[in-house]
Image (tube, rainbow, N blue to C red):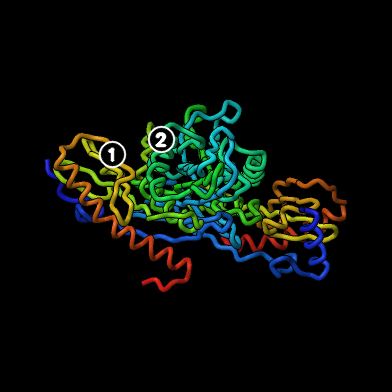
């Protein structure tokens, strides 16, 4: 089977249009909005603040905690019932791990930095959009960081290795979805998951597509952060 | 701390102004944006000043309740997201979230905004349920009005998904709107001593004496009310508050 054409007409190695804005939630310490195609994520950072329950406190450094949530009307299909579920819990965990390599919380013993990610509309790639938004929100909050994190999915549909899957590709039979996050400068991988069967060669090719896309995402993030702080954007 | 804010707000109101320079019956800029969530059957984003909320409607088919076998149903839920304020926490809905949802629900339900009879597919068997979720993005005060306005806007924006008699196809939308009969504008007024004000900022919400939420129809009649706050008000106060509410509901109506 050959995959001839994507439903939105994109090239197989092409990102959907991306857009970003920083400082969108004035009540938060830091915040950002990231949109890729029809997937849209808000992120808000609160803290550093005291961590409860107390036994989670670390006297040597602060704790980064993520909370991923889809708004009830954001999913493809039926209403998503509000409240925690196993999928959201796991995504929150892998988002924390994707972001921890870049944040330095050694100045905030016993504290927590909370990152809330909310999705008003989705078309696959939600954890990646969430990570892109969260990374900008952490920077906006002034949390010490050594790099930004950029994330995108790559994968395979039929015979093609593709970048930035949409819902119809993600849910295709025998489709392979690989969410990837990289540190923008070092290109080290901080999130890697995969659903589906693929050869090692194909996987490396998919990661290669993601690596190139990271530079494009990083550029959009940098422009949004510079706009926020009124630095000439280019 | 609240005593201090209360004192400041009072002394400003005496001079005819407020923390941000508005007069007591001025709203901050209001904007309504439709169709902001493509997976919802209808959606809207409302901003009042820096307050921002997003409402979405999902349509479901269910068995009608036995006491209203020939009617569809309505559900309103408010999510006070921890994303939108340091005062909100994740977890089960707080009392405030439940009150906001129920007050918004009553305005829509009691005004018969949506003709629930027309949502019946087969009496006693199948009927549409309209589920309205409103999520807060930034709480800079006056969530009551922002949430109610967003709910109305999302309902106005809603079209039925395709339904073959058995299953809903959420990926195929029809152009058939919901059967709407009227638009109940819900407005909340706040009393500080003898002063009445609309559209409080978050700081102003810390220090009011009493509040009243009223939903007002096109002809100025009322469909639902809810009093809040720890102080009582007089019958004369109520009459004055309602006059203001009827007049100022036009500002919110114009934003739709």
Element at badge 1? Answer: loop
Rendered location of residue B20, percent (x, y) = 69, 67
* Residue found 54% across the figure and 54% down from its top: B153
Instruction: State the residue in front, A67 or B62.
Output: A67
- Which of labels 2 and 1 is toward the front? 2
Above or below residue B205? Residue A78 is above
On the rendered structure, is A29 left or right of A15? right
Disc 2 with disc 1 on a shared chain: yes
* Residue found 43% across the figure and 31% down from its top: A86
Instruction: State the residue in front, A225 or A108.
Output: A108
* Residue found 39% across the figure and 41% down from its top: A97
Rendered location of residue A171, percent (x, y) = 28, 39
Q: Quadrant of residue B99?
A: top right
Q: Quadrant of residue B161?
A: top left
* Lower position in the chain sequence, tag 2 or tag 1: 2
Asked if one can make out residue B166 in the rendered structure from this viewpoint, the answer is yes
Instruction: State the residue in front, A117 or A211.
Output: A211
Say which chain tag 2 marks.
A
* Residue found 83% across the figure and 55% down from its top: B239
Q: Dot 2: few (<14), some (14–19), or many (≥20) neighbours within 10 Å?
A: few
- Can you name the residue that lies furthest to the bottom here? A232
Asked if one can make out residue B173 in the rendered structure from this viewpoint, the answer is no
Residue A171 circle label: 1
The residue under label 2 is A90
Residue B22 circle label: none
Say which chain tag 1 marks.
A
Rendered location of residue B128, percent (x, y) = 49, 37
On the rendered structure, is B215 left or right of A195? right
């Amino acid at each position: 089977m050959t995959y001839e054409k994507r439903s939105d007409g994109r090239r197989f190695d092409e990102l959907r249009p991306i857009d970003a804005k920083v400082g969108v939630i004035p009540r938060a310490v830091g915040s950002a909005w990231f949109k890729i195609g029809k997937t849209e994520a808000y992120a808000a950072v609160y803290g550093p603040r005291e961590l409860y329950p107390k036994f989670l406190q670390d006297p040597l450094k602060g704790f980064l905690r993520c909370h991923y949530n889809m708004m009830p009307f954001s999913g493809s299909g039926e209403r998503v019932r509000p409240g925690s579920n196993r999928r959201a819990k796991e995504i929150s965990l892998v988002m924390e791990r994707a972001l921890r390599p870049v944040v330095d919380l050694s100045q905030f013993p016993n504290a927590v930095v909370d990152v809330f990610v909310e999705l008003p509309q989705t078309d696959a790639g939600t954890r990646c959009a969430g990570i892109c938004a969260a990374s900008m929100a952490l920077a906006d909050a002034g949390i010490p960081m050594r790099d930004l994190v950029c994330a995108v999915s790559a994968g395979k549909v039929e015979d093609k290795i593709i970048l930035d899957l949409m819902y119809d590709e993600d849910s295709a039979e025998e489709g392979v979805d690989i969410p990837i996050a990289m540190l923008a400068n070092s290109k080290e991988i901080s999130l890697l998951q995969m659903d589906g069967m693929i050869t090692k060669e194909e996987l490396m090719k998919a990661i290669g597509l993601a690596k190139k896309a990271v530079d494009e995402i990083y550029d959009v993030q940098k422009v949004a952060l510079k706009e926020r702080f009124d630095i000439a954007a280019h | 701390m609240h005593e201090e804010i209360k004192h400041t707000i009072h002394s400003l109101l005496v001079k005819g102004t407020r923390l941000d320079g508005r007069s007591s019956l001025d709203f901050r800029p209001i904007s309504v944006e439709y169709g902001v969530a493509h997976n919802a059957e209808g959606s809207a984003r409302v901003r009042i000043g820096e307050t921002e909320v997003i409402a979405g409607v999902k349509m479901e088919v269910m068995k009608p309740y036995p006491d209203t076998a020939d009617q569809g149903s309505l559900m309103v839920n408010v999510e006070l997201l921890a994303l939108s304020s340091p005062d909100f926490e994740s977890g089960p809905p707080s009392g405030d979230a439940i009150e906001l949802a129920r007050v918004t629900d009553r305005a829509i339900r009691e005004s018969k905004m949506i003709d629930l009879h027309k949502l019946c597919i087969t009496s006693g068997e199948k009927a549409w349920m309209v589920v309205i979720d409103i999520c807060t993005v930034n709480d800079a005060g006056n969530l009551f009005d922002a949430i109610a306005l967003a709910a109305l806007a999302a309902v106005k924006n809603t079209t039925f998904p395709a339904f073959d008699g058995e299953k809903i196809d959420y990926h195929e939308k029809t152009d058939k709107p919901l059967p709407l009969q009227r638009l109940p504008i819900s407005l909340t007024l706040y009393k500080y001593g003898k002063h009445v004000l609309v559209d409080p900022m978050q700081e102003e919400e810390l220090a009011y004496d009493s509040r009243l939420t009223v939903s007002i129809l096109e002809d100025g009649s009322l469909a639902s009310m809810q009093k809040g706050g720890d102080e009582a008000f007089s019958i004369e106060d109520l009459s004055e508050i309602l006059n203001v509410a009827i007049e100022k509901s036009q500002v919110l109506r114009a934003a739709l």
